[in-house]
Image (tube, rainbow, N blue to C red):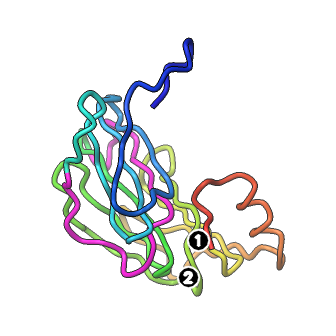
Amino acid sequence: MWDTKTGNKLQEFSYKAPITHATFSPDGKQILGASLDGTLQLWDLGTGANLARFTEKHSGKALAVVLSQPNSQLFGSEIKVLSGGTDRKIKLWDFRTGKLEREFVGHENTVTSVAFSPDNKMALSESRDHTIRLWWLAGKSPDEDIVLNLPEGEQSDQASQSSPSTLP
């Protein structure tokens, strides 16, 4: 982490495997990262200590991670985590406990990006299989999956230019 005014390094967060994507916690006191060894790592921003909360992992590389919106109708004050990676799965975690709550399966290739809808009722995932999928987190899901197909080559070019989580 760097001081934007002086350019000086304030804190360094390290782990045994390369980090592919990272995000701040809603309170700004922690950083959550996805790693090439399939794990999610959580650091204390003030001390740099690894809090090692997430005990399960992706069976391949974890490439994308995102946190839910705080104080939503669906989750209340709880914060949830979505992650995706080379195992083609989207995983939903409890941020406070690190417990894996659900897995979503349907992509045929690496998941490169994940997101929550603004109301946290849906998850979105993008994959190298040239699809974007919507997943219902609350209520009755539709009879058929919602899958948006992207033209061949278009998705991977855009993802590699706009997302730090797209690694081979």
The image quarter in which residue 94 lies: bottom left
Instruction: Count the marks.
Output: 2
Q: Is residue 139 above or below residue 130?
A: above
- Residue drawn 43% across and 71% down? 90
Q: Which residue is mark 1?
A: 133
Residue 62, label in figure: none
Q: Which residue is mark 2?
A: 107
- The magenta stretch is 52-75
Quadrant in the picture for the N terminus: top left
Identify the residue at image location x=33%, y=66%. Answer: 39
Above or below: residue 62 compared with residue 105: above
| Residue type for callout 2 | His
Residue 158 in the figure: left or right of residue 127: right
Residue 100's spot in the image, x, y percent?
Answer: 24, 67
Q: Amino acid at mark 1?
A: Arg
Give coordinates of residue 51: x percent, y percent: 19, 48
Would you say residue 53 sits in the magenta stretch?
A: yes
Image spot of residue 50 (x, y percent):
23, 47
